[in-house]
Image (spheres, rainbow, N blue to C red):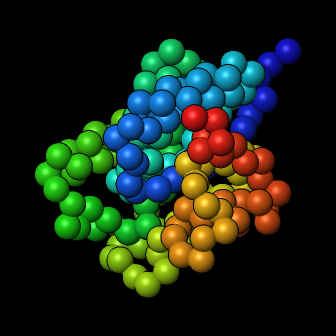
């Protein structure tokens, strides 16, 4: 019996406490491995600093072990997303962008709402959402918004915050 195709969006906070980073990475690698065993899976990452970067790097790492069943789609809100970033973060971003199987850019320039549009794009058509979300009921923040949107769309949620 063949593997089932699956789309998984990735969302999480930009700031990850140092004491959580290693446990978060380990749990994320574990979840990716479990999903890749039975699925051909396309992961959608948003390209932001923090969790998006960590998640994309984990997907690329696991793709080396599962080259026929793991794909990375980078979903970018705008071409100038890295404006104002430090050079180390831009270098990692470029590496991820170069290694991604597909790069989708929604706007040439930053516009109001383009980040939320990117988040909805990642969720639409997804089967699973892997999140690092401390408070999905927060009134502000793209991660909480994306998690709530995913739940409204009937997307299965795996919140790593509850697993680490």
Q: Nearer the viewer, residue 62 or 147?
A: 147
- Residue at the extreme left: 87
Residue at far bottom of view: 112
Q: Quadrant of the N terminus?
A: top right
Q: Residue at x 72, y 38 (%)?
A: 6
Instruction: Please indicate, yes or no, whether residue 70 appears anywhere in the rendered image.
Output: no
Quadrant of the rendered structure where residue 32 is? Answer: top right
Answer above or below: position of 131 versus 82: above
Q: Residue at x 60, y 70 (%)?
A: 138
Q: Is residue 47 left or right of residue 30?
A: left
Q: Residue at x 56, y 29 (%)?
A: 27
Residue 85 in the image: x percent, y percent? 21, 60
- Res. 48 image quadrant: bottom left
Residue 83 against residue 33 in the figure, above or below:
below
**Residue 112 falls left or right of residue 42:** left
Q: Position of residue 153 (x, y in %)?
A: 79, 62
Residue name at image x 26 percent, y 62 percent: 82
């Amino acid at each position: 019996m063949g593997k089932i195709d699956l789309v998984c969006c990735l969302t999480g906070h930009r700031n990850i406490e140092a004491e959580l980073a290693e446990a978060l990475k380990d749990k994320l690698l574990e979840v990716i491995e479990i999903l890749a065993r039975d699925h051909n899976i396309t992961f959608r990452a948003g390209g932001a600093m923090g969790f998006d970067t960590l998640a994309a790097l984990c997907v690329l790492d696991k793709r080396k072990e599962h080259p026929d069943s793991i794909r990375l789609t980078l979903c970018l809100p705008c071409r100038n997303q890295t404006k104002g970033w430090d050079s180390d973060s831009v270098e990692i971003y470029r590496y991820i962008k170069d290694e991604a199987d597909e790069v989708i850019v929604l706007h040439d320039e930053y516009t109001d709402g383009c980040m939320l549009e990117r988040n909805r794009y990642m969720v639409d058509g997804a089967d699973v959402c892997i999140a690092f979300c401390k408070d999905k009921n927060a009134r502000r923040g793209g991660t909480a918004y994306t998690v709530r949107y995913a739940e409204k769309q009937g997307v299965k949620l795996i919140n790593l915050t509850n697993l680490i």
